[in-house]
Image (spheres, coloured by chain):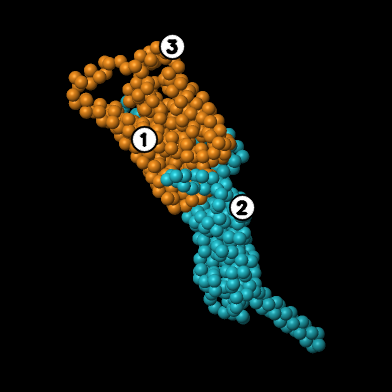
């Protein structure tokens, strides 16, 4: 029995264990942090010889399974805010459509790649750096609880502004009260950014939910997975229909690994404190940023490449 | 008696002429490709094919395997300030999707560059046949060709193997030759031409041609067919299966975890 499988859409063959292991690793991150993992999986797939367009599209098919698995596990743990998730999703889909149009205009103007890459590095650096120091500070403060209470009781200008928005409603699962428009607007904003950067958006959505919607970290992870699930269902069907780039055999082996990884990740998530999770995620975001920066600064081995990918 | 003599004479002449024909047939150079059909099934990870036959004993040979010619558009990286990024696209025209050369001696010993160019043997000969259109001003064809070959070599779709065609015993003025080619897993589907060029004293003296086909069979063929001919159904099925596996794993772990 050969442990190599031929991937009919990618047009190449790959070792089964390698794919299974890759899936497991990315699934673990997905269950732990509520990110899709496309930022990691797509470049890894390209590295092992999958054409870029097939890598990105098949990865979204794989994320459907991983986020179903992770979302189901988090639902059982009581970590999914469906009300908030649905509003963010509506905003996200609207934003995605706007973002795709925006990128077409940007491409027509020329040098879109420059704008995208620089935005990406600044966003990742900003978000990652802020999360890193904020969670590190809270972890330190947790050791001196009396000071923490003092900080938390002081309402900021931003919270007063949020409270003044119309159509306020309760989100009992997250334990927050917000205007109906806030998740819709934030969802749209993330959707636009995700479309411009060509990523699923979990990376930006998680910090937005934590810092702007003030949701508890564990509910953020579950709710983010719920959102990612629907985004990736849409991407998988569209890519299959328009570009024929989804390799189901590739996705199947990946998802067998990632669904198991997501389950383990969801359990690990419960074991860790919110601030510890934030700190870990911040480290990964910063690592991705450094990788992007290195890619921008180091002279590439090849100056020609195939189209597609993230 | 006379009748018998005629019959014997007829049979003898028949045998003689037959053996002469056989002899003549054996004297002709022959090119074989085995197998001449490559079936890609679910567990395909590349395959070896054997190319063999007979050529006149004074020949040196070059075998060229070429896939179909196509137009591809590639991204071109360049430097903007201190940053490397995609700065344009390069259209590559008339490049074979697969190119392999195997020779019995070093390529430059076979013939002059002009002769090799006609037969398209070696990267220098291939260069003139491929056209590049770059959106980046000042891009030279030489530079683009070098980059293009590097990209194709990385995928194992372009390769040159000097001195890999070996000769064996000489018989009736012909010598047998053989070489084994590794067909990579990434080989595109379609028809491939196998050309054998014979050289003697720096001159191109003979040409033989054969083919092989690369086709999908079994489950990969079914999958590809579904993906291209019933793409919406394929997409929906892929999503449903992913959700089912996701739930199944959740259920499996959920019941074990006792939540």
Q: CA distance from mark 1 to mark 3?
A: 33 Å
Q: Give the crowd class for mark 1: few <14, some 14-19, many >=20 residues within 10 Å.
A: some
Foreground label between 1 and 3: 1
**Residue at horizontal 40 percent and vertical 30 percent from the top:** A204
Q: Is residue B233 above or below residue B65?
A: above
- Numbered disc 3: what chain? A
> Which mark, residue A305?
none
Residue under label 1: A125
- Numbered disc 1: what chain? A
Foreground label between 2 and 1: 1
Q: Quarter holding the C terminus of chain B?
A: top left
Same-subunit check for callouts 3 and 2: no
Q: Return the x and y of residue B247 as percentages of the image width and height.
A: 42, 30
**Foreground pick, A195 / B163:** A195
Callout 1: SS:
helix
Q: CA distance from mark 3 to mark 2?
A: 59 Å
**Foreground pick, A305 / A23:** A305
In this orientation, does residue B88 appear? yes
A54 horizontally vs A221: left or right: right
**Residue at horizontal 59 percent and vertical 72 percent from the top:** B112
Give the colour in which the image draws chain A.
Answer: orange
Callout 2: SS:
strand
> Which mark, residue A166?
3
Q: Return the x and y of residue A140 as percentages of the image width and height.
A: 22, 28
Chain identity for the colour cyan used in the image? B
> Which mark, residue B93?
2
Where residue A139 sits, quadrant-wise, is top left
- Numbered disc 2: what chain? B
Q: Return the x and y of residue A185 as percentages of the image width and height.
A: 46, 21
């Amino acid at each position: 029995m050969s442990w190599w499988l031929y991937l009919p859409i990618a047009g190449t063959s790959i070792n089964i264990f390698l794919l299974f292991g890759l899936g497991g690793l990315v699934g673990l991150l997905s269950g732990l942090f509520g990110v899709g993992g496309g930022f990691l999986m797509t470049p890894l797939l390209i590295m092992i010889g999958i054409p870029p367009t097939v890598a990105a599209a098949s990865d979204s098919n794989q994320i459907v399974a991983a986020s179903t698995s992770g979302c189901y596990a988090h639902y059982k743990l009581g970590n999914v805010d469906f009300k908030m998730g649905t509003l963010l999703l509506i905003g996200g889909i609207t934003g995605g459509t706007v973002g795709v149009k925006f990128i077409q205009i940007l491409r027509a103007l020329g040098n879109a790649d420059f704008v995208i890459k620089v935005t990406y590095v600044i966003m990742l650096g900003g978000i990652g750096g802020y999360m890193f120091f904020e969670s590190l500070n809270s972890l330190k403060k947790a050791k001196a609880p009396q000071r923490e209470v003092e900080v938390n009781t002081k309402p900021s200008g931003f919270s007063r502004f949020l409270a003044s928005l119309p159509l306020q409603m309760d989100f009992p699962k997250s334990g927050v009260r917000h205007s109906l428009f806030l998740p819709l607007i934030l969802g749209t904003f993330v959707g636009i950014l995700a479309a411009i950067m060509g990523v699923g958006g979990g990376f930006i959505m998680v910090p937005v939910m934590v810092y702007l919607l003030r949701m508890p970290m564990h509910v953020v992870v579950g709710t983010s997975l719920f959102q990612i699930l629907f985004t990736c269902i849409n991407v998988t069907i569209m890519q299959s229909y328009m570009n024929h780039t989804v390799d189901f055999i590739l996705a199947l082996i990946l998802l067998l690994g990632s669904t198991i990884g997501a389950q383990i990740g969801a359990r690990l998530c419960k074991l860790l404190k919110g601030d510890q999770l934030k700190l870990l995620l911040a480290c990964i975001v910063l690592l991705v940023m450094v990788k992007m920066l290195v890619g921008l600064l180091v002279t590439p081995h090849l100056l020609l490449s195939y189209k597609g990918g993230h | 008696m006379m009748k018998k003599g005629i019959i014997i004479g007829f049979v003898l002449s028949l045998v003689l002429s037959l053996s002469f024909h056989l002899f003549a047939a054996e004297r002709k150079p022959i090119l074989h490709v085995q197998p001449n059909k490559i079936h890609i099934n679910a567990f395909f990870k590349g395959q070896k094919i054997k190319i063999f036959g007979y050529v006149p004993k004074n020949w040196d040979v070059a075998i060229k395997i070429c896939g179909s010619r196509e137009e591809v558009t590639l991204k071109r990286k360049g430097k903007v300030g201190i940053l490397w990024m995609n700065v344009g696209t390069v259209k590559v025209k008339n490049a074979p999707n697969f190119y392999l050369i195997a020779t019995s001696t070093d390529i430059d010993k076979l013939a002059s560059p002009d002769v090799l160019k006609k037969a398209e043997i070696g990267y220098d000969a291939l260069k003139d046949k491929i056209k590049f259109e770059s959106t980046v001003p000042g891009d030279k064809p030489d530079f683009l060709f070098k980059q293009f070959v590097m990209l194709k070599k990385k995928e194992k779709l372009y390769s040159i193997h000097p001195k890999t065609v070996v000769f064996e015993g000489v018989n009736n003025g012909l010598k047998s030759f053989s070489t084994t080619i590794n067909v990579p897993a990434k080989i595109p589907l379609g028809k491939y031409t196998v050309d054998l060029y014979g050289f003697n004293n720096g001159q191109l003296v003979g040409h033989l041609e054969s083919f092989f086909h690369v086709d999908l069979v079994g489950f990969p063929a079914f999958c590809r067919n579904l993906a291209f001919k019933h793409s919406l159904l394929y997409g929906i099925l892929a999503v449903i299966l992913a959700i089912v596996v996701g739930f199944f794993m959740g259920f499996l772990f959920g019941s074990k975890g006792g939540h």
